[in-house]
Amino acid sequence: MPILLPALHRFTAACRAGQRLRQWLAMGGVSVWLVLTPHTALAAADAYAQVSTLLTQGQAEAALAQIQSHLAQHPQDAQMRFLQGAAQSQAQQWDGAIATYTALTQEFPELPEPHNNLAVIYAHQGQLEAARQALLRAINNNPEYAVAHENLGDIYLRLAHQAYGQSVKLQGAQPAVQHKLQGLQTLLQSTP
């Protein structure tokens, strides 16, 4: 199942829009927008690029160190927190990644990417129903989100394999069920 890292530009834009809306509502609906200065925006873009490069190179621990340093100064930076979840996943810090993505899904429930990545972790842990629910939320938020549809298909394959396997245990190896089970096994072996 693909864990999403790249769609950060759209993720960032949506997070900023959500932050601006919350800031606007907190100010009583007065049109006050907080914007980044060009210098701050360039520094943040450079930090995201550095962390993304480290993750692409498989250097999760180094990425986490940079992320922690950045978040110490900018604890509400949703994009860096998203990268934190990706780095935690890459470092197999599953509890931390779940906490990071769960917090993002609560703060930005409209974004599909944190739901997708949370589903990937749940699936990795064998929590297929939790993964399915997270993917349905991702797809509900963005029906055109192809990665979530692909991941949901993988979850359904695994659930079908479990169901047919249970059928074989309960009633023995019926030829039709055994055939379906073998077909699913072939499909599951071809999925990354």
Image (spheres, helix red, strand yellow):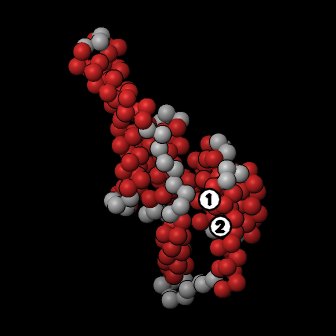
* Left or right side of 6 for 71: right
Badge number at residue 6: none
Is 60 above or below relative to 173?
Answer: below
Residue 120, given in percent of the width and then of the height, sits at 50, 45
Residue 41, given in percent of the width and then of the height, sits at 65, 79
Q: Which residue is mark 1?
A: 83
The residue positioned farthest toward the left in the image shown: 176
Q: Which residue is mark 2?
A: 48
Q: What residue appears at the point 35 percent right and 21 percent down from the top-left corner? A: 165
Whether tag 2 and tag 1 are in contact, CB under 8 A, the answer is: yes
SS type, badge 1: helix
Binning the other alpha carbons within 10 Å of mark 1 as few (below 14), some (14 to 19) or many (20 upward) gives many
Residue 156, given in percent of the width and then of the height, sits at 35, 38
- The kind of residue on which mark 1 rests is Leu
Binning the other alpha carbons within 10 Å of mark 2 as few (below 14), some (14 to 19) or many (20 upward) gives many
SS type, badge 2: helix
- Image quadrant in which you'd find residue 16: bottom right
